[in-house]
Amino acid sequence: MSTTSTSAFPNPLSIATPEGCEGWEEMYPYYTLLGEDRREADEQRLWFWNSMHFPEPMSAFDVVAIDGPYYALANWQNRVFAIPPAMGIDYRIVNGYVFITPNAVTDPELIAERAAFFGARAGHYFANWDELYGRWREKMGKLIAEITELEVPELRTYEEDSVAFEDRDTSFVRVLDAYNRALRMHEQMWQHHFEFLLLGYGAYLTFSDFCKSALPEIPDQHIAQMVSGIDVLLFRPDTELRHLARLARDAGVDASFSNGRAPEEIVAELGRSEAGRGWLEALEAVKDPWFNMGSGDGFYHHHRSWLDDPSIPFSAIRGHIDALAEGRDTERPTEHLAAERNRLAAEYGALLDEQARGTFNELLGLSRTVFPYVEEHKFFCEYWFQSRFFNKIREFGGLLAKHGFLHDGEDVFQLSRHEVGEALEELVLTWAHGGPPRGPHHWPPIVERRRALLERLKQWSPPPAMGTMPTEAINDPISVMLWGITPERLRSWASAMGGDSLTLSGAAASPGVAEGLARVVRDVHEITDVQPGEILVSTVTSPAWAPIFPKIRAAVTDIGGIMSHAAIVCREYGLPAVVGTGRATAEIRTGQRLRVDGTTGVVTLLEDEPE
Amino acid sequence: MIGCARTLAQLRAQDEESFGGKSTSLGELIAAGIPVPPGFAISTAAFEAFLAAGGLGARVEAILADLDPDDVAAVAAAAAAIALEMRRTPVPDTVAAEVERHYAELAGASRKGQPPVAVRSSARGEDSAEATFAGQQETYLWVRGGEGVCEAIRGCWISLYSPEAIAYRARMAAAGAVAAMGVAVQLMVDAEVSGVMFTCSPLTGDPSVVAINASWGLGLGVVGGEVTPDDFLISKVSREVLRATIADKQVEYVPDPGGRGTHRVAVDESRRTVACLDDERLSGLVETARAVERHFGSRQDVEWAIARTGSFPENLFVLQSRPVTATAKAGSEAVADRSGLDAMSLVLGTFGVRPRKD
């Protein structure tokens, strides 16, 4: 049976497998797939493509980065804080892409029951925020150290003496234990990640709602500006790059950064002069911790840190050197930002009557208390920890490759976390007993097939949503805040679905109007293709992309609200931005001329096809 | 009649009883440093002198005696009869002399022989229902010469006896409603663009924005609702244009080629769908709106014009300002619901815990 109501979005179970992608389901756990047994329930729900976190098809191993956050989000939201109207996020994988839907609580009695838990538990966090956040940073620091130091044992012909004489565990135990510990630490990281996030967002959302009821015309970006931190940890890595650029000029070694040079070449050349060596020392001094910044959002194994892939920081340094050469100030105008933040708060406060002003100031204070966490956690979790975690899995891949189970260590990411466990189990077994392993015959063809599948799945454009439009307003603060999923947004996506219209609408995230040629970026590795003066069109952006913003003229994203990173960074740089358009990367081609109106939230496609 | 006229700059709020609301509010604006076209005001005493001269008052009383306010035909006939009587009665010489003297002063200051002026009625209690019914809206534009001004002043007085005003006062007689009116005379601004602005959102009452309606030419078109104006909503805090709707502005009022009165013409094609204000002018208007609001300490409805000559912002003038009374206080209920609560209860409310007010 199909659903009773009509929907502008496709029926989840009627979405066809793209040609040549048959069998894609083998990469994913059974519970992530749509099926006849859940047809009725799944058709009735609205699933939206989480292109914010998962813009590309998932490799088999990277499913850890779906499960990890969604275990943690739901566990805190539903079972710890018992947020009254919202349980957790459910997800399905279709053609390799992740679609999500919030599970709501609608029974008023149950909501009341949950409210009692929530009040006490959330109250505790808000009342002790700074102290608890201090402890949080300590435990994250420990976890990062632990994953970094985790030993992936070598499998030697003869165990070391310590096993024989000092009661040390044998290698099979240590290999399997290390792998399980790596997975456990990954889960703990996500646990930490969501401990404060929901409450932080909630406090912000409350302030935002209050502003909008007292001042109905207030632009969203002014609300954000009043709350956003100035001395934000996430801007620090880019700030360090600016300093390095200035230092390179001052030391007269800026010529080494000429266009098209690989980081290794630059480093090699710098190593040959005294001034260059001085610069390299300065670079080393800031690498820990700032080069733990990621190049992506940490949801994919190929989102490497700057330490692992220095091409992004080096290209950013070069951009900053160019800007300095042209006499442009590349420093973040922190004083100006701080003054503007305080001016906005004072002026809006002054427009309210005394009682409303009291509430406004109290909520603003609370939002500013919680917001550092909201802004900073990514550095510790998504970038620093995740890059170390995926590197650790690479070490296990290396171990499997060394023993012929894989052609290359990197192939490990084509196996699910359970398959990697299985492969390691066979490896330690056959290594121990010396008999012939099946793994070297079993795994490589699977890896090859999946690589090809993923390449083909990348060509597919997922719809922004599937299933049935909800009749009631979405009541999940996280969906609204993080994904910008409001009833209005869903309606505009729905109307864009059928249309051949030349405009896309989204949230007006950063004011101003700009015209230029589009650069569609669907994969983090393509960001180095962005040319000066282009308009960035992407599924989503992350703080890791900050270095390219000085180059671009405007930004358009498929998903995200006014607090999304593209929005924040564009406001910083004074670039127009429209976020949450639903289909920008599907509708727009690189080279097409666009007009981006960040004040009204409209993107106009000025030419049908690139010239 | 000495003292029945005074320059606008001398008037303050406490003079309303004698000069009416419009004139005194213009005086207040001038005192606050807001650019207002110079001019003078005629007191209600001048009107009383007019009625006293030659027994006009008694004849008007007679016409109104025993009038049934619900008899539409009778009220209309009475209005016509009074208008006729009044037109036959010249403005008293003492008043006319004062008008001539002030007009000559204006002419001297503007260095024009017979500068065009606007003549507007200035009723007491401008924002009361009485003022609305009493025909306070009467306005004569592009009037020239002392004699012309006197004629226009008489026109304002006659408007006190419109059928609506007569019927209204007859019903309110018991409450002591009496006819009384001042008049404001100001140098005319030959407006390239004009309009009205609210120092809050007219729809939501949001005090953080200025709403501006603007169209080409003199303000008649916008005030009278004859053109759909360009509609701008601007943040007071950042000066950003939050919304702009550019209308197809088909007609505009311009000074009559004969030098007296105004004339309605079609807007030429090239300007019809073009925004009639740019960012600089919008920003200047917002600044002026905020200054007016600050001065009066309440939300204002401001009529303004930008002259064809001179450079911005020196050519921006405020023509009048009134308190805004009719808008909703921003989200008043929602705000009142929340304002009494501490931040924590509100945050819990975001997560679905219904707030309780103790």
Image (tube, coloured by chain):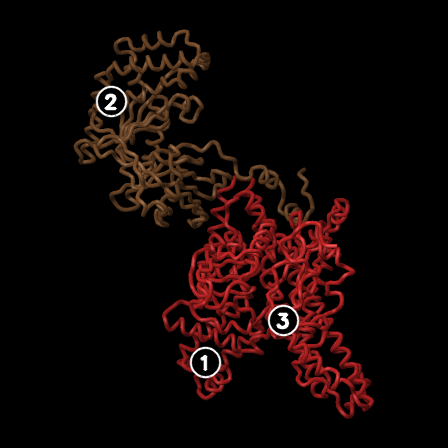
- According to the image, label 2 marks what residue? B150
- Can you give x and y, in whole percent of width and height, for residue A423 in the image? 76, 81
**Of tags 2 and 3, which is closer to the observer?**
3
Determine if marks 2 and 1 fall on one subunit.
no
Colour assigned to chain A in the rendering is red
Q: Mark 3 lies on which chain?
A: A
- According to the image, label 3 marks what residue? A457
Question: In the figure, residue A48 lies in which quadrant?
Answer: bottom right
Q: Is residue A122 left or right of residue A335?
A: right
**Do we see residue A227 in this rendering?**
yes
Q: Residue at x 43, y 32 (%)?
A: B323
Q: Is residue A392 above or below residue A9?
A: below
Structural distance between the alpha carbons of marks 1 and 3: 31 Å
Q: In this view, does B49 lie above or below A328?
A: above
- According to the image, label 1 marks what residue? A260
The amino acid at mark 3 is: Leu
The amino acid at mark 2 is: Cys
The amino acid at mark 1 is: Gly
Q: Are marks 2 and 3 in contact (CB under 8 Å)?
A: no
**Do we see residue A550 in this rendering?**
no
- Can you give x and y, in whole percent of width and height, for residue A272 in the image? 46, 88
